[in-house]
Structure formats: structure tokens, C-alpha cells
Amino acid sequence: MRIILNLLPLLRLSSNARILSVLNAGKEAPMYENDLGLSGPDAWSLMRTVNNTTTMHTLAMDYLAMQPENADVVFMHAYPGWVKTGIFKHLEPKEETGWVWTACLVVLRQVAKGALWWGGVTPEECAERQVFQLLDKQFEAGKVGRKGCVLLGWQCEVLEGNDVLERYKREGWPARVWDFTDDVFQRVGGLGSGRR
């Protein structure tokens, strides 16, 4: 998010500015609203991390897209699908985890390898899709057919927001998420957006 904020002044000068963030678009789910940073003692879990990261990312992109000074910048959040990166090959258990967790990881690696072989795309194909999203005329400002952050599926299709995402937008969560993000920027380096 910080790099987007830093590049926005230059992007606003472009006649065809687009921002493409590749994460988990279309998979937005309920956030742990009481602790967005998941810093409390009982707040963290894998699913909360995935849900908060995905949903907060879309809401922050939506917040930036809705600012009047960014009216000519297209903000896109894409889901790449399953990409054959070999990421699970490097998933190794710590010595102290015991044999059960080690066995679970071996099974998980094999299942993931099979699923990626069957339904995954190569990194090259994934990159081609991202370049298409950045360059194709259908994603130009004013042609996307919606305001805010555009969600894109793994086959470059425009996705509709789900009920959870729409509720968060109605309740003003894009600004709350942006305020949280800006506070983190301030805390880690005094680099807030200055927008309050």
C-alpha cells in the first residue's frame, strides 16, 4: 500500500494510469473487526490473517480509488488463481514440531502439488494475464463500468463484490481501514499520508 501511495502523484499525471495489486480479489470475508492488526493475545489465527489481509486490502484500494484526485486512476485488485510456483516445496517443519505435524506437512505438500498440476497455471501465464490487465483498453478509466476498486478474477473477468464487501462499504469501512493503515505508516516510520 505504501508504494501505491508514493507513486500516486506521478500516476495522476498519466493519461492511462492503472494500479494492479495481485492478492486475493473476490475472496473477501468477514474481518476480525475488533482488532484489525490482529495484535491482541487471542486475535491471531491463519484464517483471520487471510480474511483481514484480503478484505482490508480491497477496502484500502477502494478508499484510494474513491478520492476525487484519483478519479482518472484505475485501481485493480486481482486474484491470480493457483500458480505453479513450487511454494510448498519449501514448507518444512521445525525439528521440535514432532512426527504428526511432519506427516501432515508431507501430505499437504503432495496434495498441493497434485492440485497445482491439475488446476494451476504457470508463472509465465499468470504474468501474461497481469500484463493484459494493465494494458487492455477494457480496463481504461471510464470503461470499467464501476467506481472504486475493480476486482478481477484469475481469467481476467471483472468480479462483483460479495455481500460482506458491500456491507463494509455501506458501513464506512474503507475510511476506517485507511485510517488504520495510515496509523501503521506513522508508527513504523512517521510516513503517514497526512490525510485526516
Image (cartoon, helix red, strand yellow):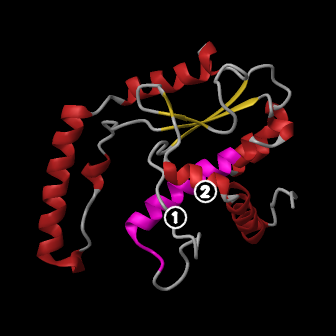
Answer yes or no: do the residues labelled 2 and 1 have beta carbons within 8 Å?
Answer: yes
Q: Foreground: 42 or 32? A: 32
Indicate which label's residue lies in the foreground, 2 or 1.
2
Alpha carbon of mark 2 to alpha carbon of mark 1: how far?
10 Å
Which residue matches tag 1?
A: 31
35 within the magenta span: no
Residue at the spot 19% in from the left edge and 52% down from the top edge: 109
46 within the magenta span: yes
Residue at the spot 58% in from the left edge and 55% down from the top edge: 167
Residues packed near mark 2 inside 10 Å, few (<14), some (14 to 19) or many (20 plus): some
Check disc 2 and report its element: helix, strand or loop: helix
Residues packed near mark 1 inside 10 Å, few (<14), some (14 to 19) or many (20 plus): many
Main secondary structure of the magenta stretch: helix
Of the image marks 2 and 1, the number of the one nearer the N terminus: 1
Magenta span covers which residues? 43-62
Q: Foreground: 106 or 193? A: 193
Q: Of the residues shown, which amino acid type is indicated by label 2?
A: Tyr
Percent x, y of residue 172: 70, 58
Residue at the spot 20% in from the left edge and 34% down from the top edge: 117
Quadrant of the image for the C terminus? bottom right
Which residue matches tag 2?
A: 168
